Structure formats: C-alpha cells, structure tokens
Amino acid sequence: MIKNFVFDMGNVLVFYDSLRVVRQFAEGEEQIQAVNNSVFVSPEWLMLDMGVIPEEEALRRMQARLKGEREKEAARLCLEHWHEYCMWPVPGMEELIACLKERGYGLYLCSNASLRMLNCYQDVIPGIKLFDGILFSAEVKCIKPQKEMYGHLFDRFGLKPKECYFVDDQPLNIEGARECGMDGYCFADGDAKTLGKILKEVGQRRV
C-alpha cells in the first residue's frame, strides 16, 4: 500500500532553466553559452549538488575557464543569483500537492541540489509547507541515482521503500529508486493533470 509520495524538485515541482539567469548578466550568444557551460554545465555544479566543494572554490574554478573579465563577472553574478531567476512553479503542482495531502498521504522532497536551497526553497517550491520531509543531496554528500541518496531518505524519515512512490523527471533516477525498492513514475512531459490521474490510480491499485 502506497502511503507516501516522494517528489523531485527541478522540472517536477518547479521548472528549471539556467539560461534565464545567464541572460540577465551575460551579453551575446557566444558569451551566454560560455558562461552557462562554465557555471551550470560543469563538474563544479555537480560537486555543489554533492556538497563537497564550497561556493568560493567552485566560482574560482568556473572563472578560470573563462576568457575576459566581463565573462568572469557574469559567472560570479550567475552563481550568486541563480536561485532568483532559474526556477518557477510547474502549473497545477500546488493543487496536486494539496489534493494528495488531503487524501492523507505523506509528502517528501528528494532533490539533487546544493546547500543554497536550504535558504531559499520555501520561496520557490509550490505547496512546500505541506511536505513532511525535505532532503537535498548536498546535505548527505551524494546524489541520485546513487542508492545512498535513497537510503538517506528512508532512514531520515523512517520510510519503508515499498510504501513510497517516486516522481522524478529523469529515468535513471526512477531506475535507481526501483533498485532500492521504491517504485516511481518519470514525469517527463510536465503535465500535472496527467500526473494527478496516474497518482490516483497508483493509490487505488495498491490498497
């Protein structure tokens, strides 16, 4: 019986697009792509999600790959302000979260994200006050789809994998969850209405 729904954050509860912040501080497509690649498509970004590097060191490495001072400054501003621009709610998700809570399900967040999110998640995630538990990868120094990430989720909140159902936009993360005993659904189309129907069916057939 499914008692809990576990949600990813990016492209599930909120849409995410790094170019939204890069376009605020970089000019011209060449510079925009260079800064975006150096900051957001980088090993340092992954390391921030894993909580194994401070932002100051990550920025130093990101800037080292860029040519001019304008690009380096744009990288600094992007890293400092990305959370203000890159995320916006997926339509219908707040209503879906409220509906699931009303039905008595436990609600949990399990997301690959840096420690920065601990200071701003309440401002950007729809329905977050209805969640029973939140886990960001940087807190436990591992990321999905590593089995350790799911293990931390279950241990921290006292959850049984077979009683949880996971919603993520990445197939690999769903596969990783299944290997740990938690079934799930790949939310690739961003359609909250369809997702709501699927989760209702999941709850019914598992009773």
Image (cartoon, rainbow, N blue to C red):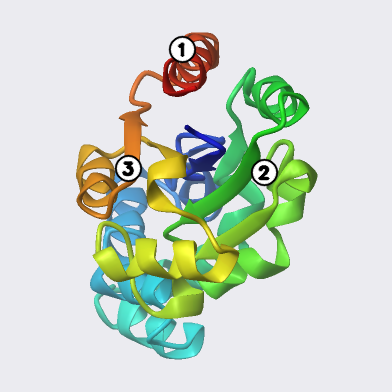
Residue 201, label in figure: 1
Pointer 2 residue:
125
Q: Nearer the viewer, mark 2 or mark 1?
A: 1
Near mark 3 (Cα within 10 A), the count class, few <14, some 14-19 or many ≥20, is few
Q: Amino acid at mark 2?
A: Ile
Q: Secondary structure at mark 2?
A: loop
Mark 3 lies on residue: 29
Q: Secondary structure at mark 3?
A: helix
* Residue 169, disc: none
Give residue 49's position: percent from left, percent from top: 41, 69
For discs 2 and 3, the disc positioned in front in the rendered view? 2
Choose the circle earlier in sequence order: 2 or 3: 3
Of residues 198 and 138, the one drawn nearer to the viewer in this rendering? 198
- Along the viewing direction, whichever of 62 and 110 lies nearer the viewer: 110
Mark 1 or 3, closer to the camera: 1
**Residue 80 visible within the image:** no
- What's the CA distance linking mark 2 and mark 3? 30 Å
Amino acid type shown at disc 1 = Glu
Number of numbered discs overlaid on the protein picture? 3
Gap in Å between the C-alphas at discs 2 and 1? 25 Å
- Residue under the image location 25 percent in, 64 percent down: 146
SS class, disc 1: helix
